[in-house]
Amino acid sequence: MLAALLIMIAACWMYSITVTLMRVRCIILERERHAPWVAALSGEAK
Amino acid sequence: MARRSINWFKYTSPASFYPLAGKMIPWFGIATGLLLAAGLYVGFILAPTDFQQGDAYRIIYIHVPAAWMAMLLYLLMAVYAGLGLAFNARLWSMMASAIASTGALFAFLALWTGALWGKPMWGTWWVWDARLTSTLILFFLYLGFLSLQAMIEDARRADRAGALLALVARSMFPSSTSQSSGGTLCIRALRFASAKLRPSRP
């Protein structure tokens, strides 16, 4: 069925976007750990 | 009435993008869950059995999207890495790094599901034809990109080295990393999937 294939392609797209955004957030925190805004963020978390 | 305009360049800064990404993740996550459930239900339960391949053909509902995404994500990764290199933008290089592991996952999934389908249909797990070999090269390119970035301690140098690797590989292995073979694969699969809807003629 064509519909299933198109839905699965859309699902893979959504998954890729979700995982990329989650991963890029982790990379941002790792690389910007000395930036004041990350320190402020971790202060908020505490 | 005053027009409100959004300054999109603001979101190229990691500090501005971080909270925006946090807001977008739940929406894309919900869409992923719903679409995945619907796609698997229609593909594995509602779709009729093929008269030649039986139920083995159903693997196309995972294999084709995975292969297509692997190639498309490489292209996207190379574009982000190239932009990061050209404009010295940190966020775009970070995006390229973030995309690489998802691309590697999809390339592995495409190889694995292809082998699972190949054994009952072709009688072998693997053949060294152009499409399979180019997907294997694509998988190794992802692993190479990830390894190169991991082995360089300075993040900016790692970004530059990764970008060069992604761009050079893109120009050297166009069949592995471009949409030409992925597009052909997708069109063939779309034809096959749409043919399932037509009733068989005597």
Image: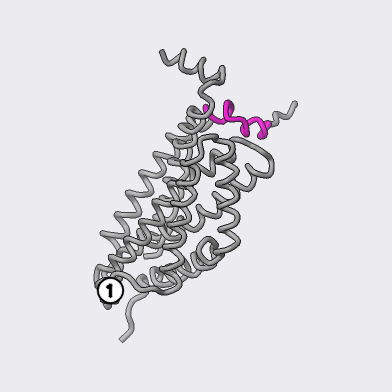
Q: Is residue A15 above or below residue B116?
A: above
Q: Is residue B64 left or right of residue B183?
A: left
The boundaries of the magenta stretch are: B6-19
> Residue A19 or A13: which is nearer the viewer?
A19
Residue A6 found in image quarter: bottom left
Name the quarter where the C terminus of chain B is drawn: bottom left
* Magenta run includes residue B8: yes
From the image, give the main secondary structure of the stretch colored magenta.
helix
Extreme-right residue of the structure: B1
Residue B178 found in image quarter: bottom right
Name the quarter where the N terminus of chain B is drawn: top right
Q: Residue at x 28, y 74 (%)?
A: B124
Residue B49 found in image quarter: bottom left
Q: Residue at x 35, y 49 (%)?
A: B36
Q: Residue at x 28, y 61 (%)?
A: B46
Coordinates of residue B122 in the picture (x, y in percent): 29, 76
Q: Residue at x 38, y 60 (%)?
A: B110
Coordinates of residue A45 in the picture (x, y in percent): 42, 16
* Magenta run includes residue A10: no
Residue tagged 1: B124
